[in-house]
Amino acid sequence: MIEVQNLHKTFGKVQAVAGVSFTAPDGQITGLLGPNGAGKTTTLRMLYTLMSPETGTIRIDGIDARNQTLDARRHLGVLPDARGLYKRLTARENIAYFARLHGLGGKTLGVQVDAIINLLAMQDIADRRTEGFSQGQRVKVALARALVHQPHNLILDEPGNGLDVMATRALREFLRQQRAEGRCVLFSSHIMQEVTALCDRIVVMAKGRVAAEGTAEELRARTGAANLEDAFVSLIGTSEGLAA
């Protein structure tokens, strides 16, 4: 479970995140929605400890991520907005490198790397250098790195960005599998169809704040909209009007 309370983050005079609070429960997929500049990526970076909030608390499975950073990281699998593959390494070598960073070694390392390659059906690319990989292949490797240490919580920033239809279908099925195994999945997306198809709960951000949260049906009912996209536009418009 990921619990966020009253996060604030500024960059110079810009208030990127202004009092964000929400919970992403176990066994559910929580979507983080918002227009560009809403503070989604900054919020996620604070959750996976790349940035420190100025105020507020972050708990990962009850662990204080601000004061017990290394312990919290062991409970997280992260797909960041920048995939950052090492192009001269093979997919397998990229995954193994990150496995070692998480403390895996010896026979366990090889077993876990093989297991995640099989899980994501990466056998055909596992021993190829990642330079020249397609976007879908790059996302697979980045996901494998995030999952190789079997974390309980997944944080994914725009996981479907640039994927083709088949890769998108595979990603959705994979995330549903993680939910069925009781994991906490938190991801940001601009793709309304993806959010509607996957998310148990949705957190809508605008102007660095949480504008609304609930199921897709609850958000539609709240705004009187026929679909999630219309509800989203209504919610961020209301939030921006109040902020002004």
Image: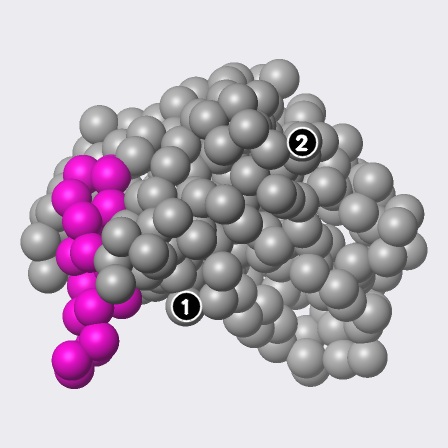
Residue on which the image places disc 1: 37
Q: How far across and how far down the image is residue 209, in percent?
A: 28, 51
Residue on which the image places disc 2: 226
**Which residue lies at the image location 34% right of the left edge and 50% below the top edge?**
239
- Mark 2, secondary structure of its residue: loop
Q: Is residue 81 above or below residue 239?
A: below
175 relative position to 37: left or right: right
Return the residue nearer the eye: 108 or 102.
102
Which labelled disc corresponds to residue 212? none
Question: Is residue 167 shown to the viewer in this render?
Answer: yes
Callout 1 environment at 10 Å: few (<14), some (14 to 19), or many (20+)? some
Q: Quadrant of the N terminus?
A: top left
Quadrant hosting residue 178: top right
Q: How far across and how far down the image is residue 231, in percent?
A: 55, 39
**Which residue lies at the image location 43% right of the left edge and 53% below the top edge?**
237
Q: How far across and how far down the image is residue 60, in percent?
A: 28, 35
Residue 140 within the segment the image draws in magenta:
no
Quadrant hosting residue 5: top left
Q: Amino acid at mark 2?
A: Ala
Q: Which residues are magenta?
A: 4-21
